[in-house]
Amino acid sequence: MSSNRLTPPTDKEAWNNHLPPIVLPMPSTAGVSSTHNKLLKYRRFKEQQKTLNQIVIDRALKDYKATMEEKYQRVPTPPEPELPSTMNSEQKKRRTNYLFMKKCVESNPVVPIQQQWLTSMLTLVPQSLMEGKDRELLVEELLDEVTKDFEMSMKRCVVRSVLVKPDVKGLEDEKEGPLPVSPLGLDFSRPWHNSFIQARSQILTNLHILHPTLKILLDIGYTTFSKLLIVDLSNVSLKGPIDCESLKNDVSLNCSKTEEKLLNTWYPRVINLFTRKEALEGVKSDKVDSFYNCVATLMSNQLKELLRRTVEAYVKLFDPEDKKWLPLFKMELTFDDEKMEFYPSFQDLEEAILFIVTRIGQTLQNVQTVHSWLSGGATAVTLDTELADHVLAWASSTLKRAIQANLEGPKEHFERYVERYGWLVDGTADTRIESFEAEEHSFDEYTAFIDEFLSLAKEIMSLPLLAHFPMVRLDCDDLKQGLTDKAKSFANILMEIIVANHRAENEKICKEFETIKERALKVPETTEEMMEMIAYVEKAKTTGIQELLIKIKECQRRMNYLLDVYIFDPEDLALNATVLLWPQKINPIFDEHDDLIEQSKRKGESELLAKREKLILELEKQTRRMEEFTEFSELDRMQQYVTDMRALQKRIQEAEETVAFINKEETLFKWELTEYPVLESLKVNIEPYQKLFVLILKWQRTEKRWMDGAFLDLNGESMETEVDEFFREIYKMLKVFQQKQKKAELEKKTLHRRAIVEEKLEEEKKDNPTITMCSSVMEQIKDFKVKKKTLIIILSIYGQILRPLLIQVDLKILLS
């Protein structure tokens, strides 16, 4: 039927299909621990190839077993028959000869059908049936078919008149027999005419479909049902994603409403039609039951057709060639009880879609027949409106195929989750953590493992919340949240371990400081005790405090990491503060905040003026702070200099933000925008100091690492290269500050009292702390190069000899 023809989607419709969002590639796994080697070497295509090969082998073995079983159960082949004395028997010769002669006779040309005969045939067809382009093509096809049938009949007649089919084996299917004999002595009377008249009269009596009342019933049915569907779901795709249960309820409600509407409109019209006097006009009394049976059959066919069209229209929504009418269902990926699942499940979705077909088939199943309604009997007789089994089977199979095809995308999306994050819930992560806890690892190794889980949680949360497919809108929020919480729970397990270790180390540091405090504040009773105390305090100042400072720095490094990823208890925060304040407990340094805000003269502009004044004061303060950098010359306080320099950079950044805010406010007030050249000067002047302090600090740490590190880790060539690099950089910085000093001298030479200023500049030049510090560092590097010359030579000559010996010593120690 024309309603079953599926039209392919246009280009515009194809572009409207919703594609799934692009997933970004997983982050780089460079630098992971050795426990990840197996994961890094994993290749999915190898696993797929292995699985495919296994499937092929299994199928081959299965087919081989089936073949062998069939071979054992097969009946033994009978012996080959003996060949006749001659290969061509008499029957075969006769059969071959007949077929050859038949072919020759059929190949002869025959007289074609006359055109006037075809024209005469067409005159018998009503003109209304031949109008239209489609009808003209149909007429041409029918004429071609008649012409071919005429030619085939003529050929068969010639064969039957010329050839006689021999009675041999192999020609049983040949239908060309001899022509019938002439009907000599037969009766040519026309007894069939009376029977024809009798049959026509009987047809007129029993063919109730031609009754005028049934014609009116057909018209009523056509008017009512031609454009009606029990439930029209063609616009369901425009409503957006729908829930399965909501769709089932809506369909059930619409079916009930449509049924009620038909029973209140169409059915009363039908009843009214048969209550008229002329309804049974011309129907004999003994044919009344037959007449009403015909009415019931006609009404049943009309209702069945309505139900069938509704089912076909619903099934057409799932046409794979035209997906613009495809309903969009809501589905979720859930994480419940350590399992990743679909909700609703695929089975529930399929049942909901097939339920609509069932519900349509249940509609209009209790329509009473006209005869039963008119008779008013106690037992009501209903029309047979049940859908045919083949219609339900076709709809079910078609919908199942469409559902399976449209669920491939959600399945693949789910498989990607399982493939990438399934190890969080299948026990792999638990096993890795247990084995990691059983081993000894440093704080950095713990943080690297924790960061792996936190990065995984962040990656999961960055995945798209919704995945769009032609038939499904997949909500992944619950699964994302569940996997994120699972990854964070593993990270929390590891963090609890390092927090416990961090707490124990802090308590140990505080205990050592308390011990030093008790010994230092204890009143000595004797001179010997006083000397012992002096020696103890002196030792504590030189070695004990330095060791504790190193431990505190390590503690601060751990705390800086934990503050970003862990929420400390108040007791732990107090303990951390105590540890950090111990070295400066006597003279604590607190950040001073100047709150010099002048009362504004005008109410609307006071705050802006105050901010400008505060910024000016802050810039002056930072300028003075910047000038203090020129006095920094103690190499032992280089870490503090770097910290102060970074703090000043942060203040400058805050000042830039404040300037942006002030300019924005000035624009709103329509004031002239203020400029702060001092801020730009600060940014330019701080850069040399930042490079210098960082370079010196890097040199100090490198020298300490070389001097205090393992001997075998030293490399003479790299040490020499790094020392030369340090020397070149510090030399460049020295030149920068010397040029800066000369520039300042040139600017001041233009002022009055040039001679006095030059004398002062000479003194400043001699006593400039920054240049002095640069020179000191250069001298240190020179001394280091001289002192380490011998060490570098030893490393380059005897490194290969000492290393195997030391390795052997280490092996002996391990074996012992």
Image (cartoon, helix red, strand yellow):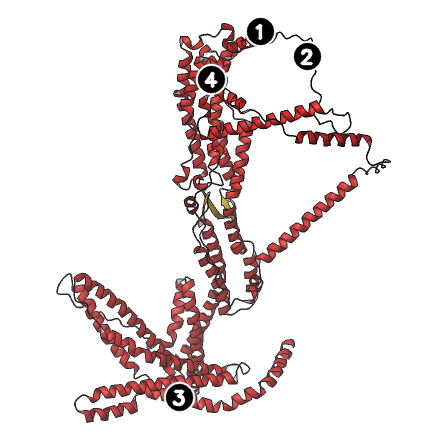
Q: In the rendered structure, which disc, 3 or 1, sits on the residue that comes first in sequence? A: 1
The nearer-to-camera label among 1 and 2 is: 2
Residue of label 3: 778
User: Which residue occupies the foreground of this view, 318 or 703?
Assistant: 318
Q: Is residue 140 left or right of residue 579?
A: right
Q: In the rendered structure, which disc, 1 or 4, sits on the residue that comes first in sequence? A: 1
Q: In the rendered structure, which disc, 2 or 4, sits on the residue that comes first in sequence? A: 2
CA distance for labels 3 and 1:
138 Å
The nearer-to-camera label among 4 and 3 is: 4
Residue of label 1: 194
Q: In the rendered structure, which disc, 4 or 3, sits on the residue that comes first in sequence? A: 4
Neighbours of disc 2 within 10 Å: few (<14), some (14-19), many (20+): few
The kind of residue tagged 1 is: Asn
- The percent position of residue 10, horizontal first and vertical second, equals 43, 43
Residue at 55% x, 35% y: name it: 397
Question: Element at badge 1?
Answer: helix
The kind of residue tagged 2 is: Pro
CA distance for labels 2 and 3:
139 Å
Q: In the rendered structure, which disc, 2 or 3, sits on the residue that comes first in sequence? A: 2
Residue of label 4: 368
Residue 379 seen by the camera: no
CA distance for labels 1 and 4:
42 Å
CA distance for labels 2 and 4:
58 Å
Residue 183: which disc? Answer: 2
Neighbours of disc 4 within 10 Å: few (<14), some (14-19), many (20+): some
- The percent position of residue 348, horizontal first and vertical second, equals 51, 39
Question: Element at badge 4?
Answer: loop
The nearer-to-camera label among 2 and 4 is: 2
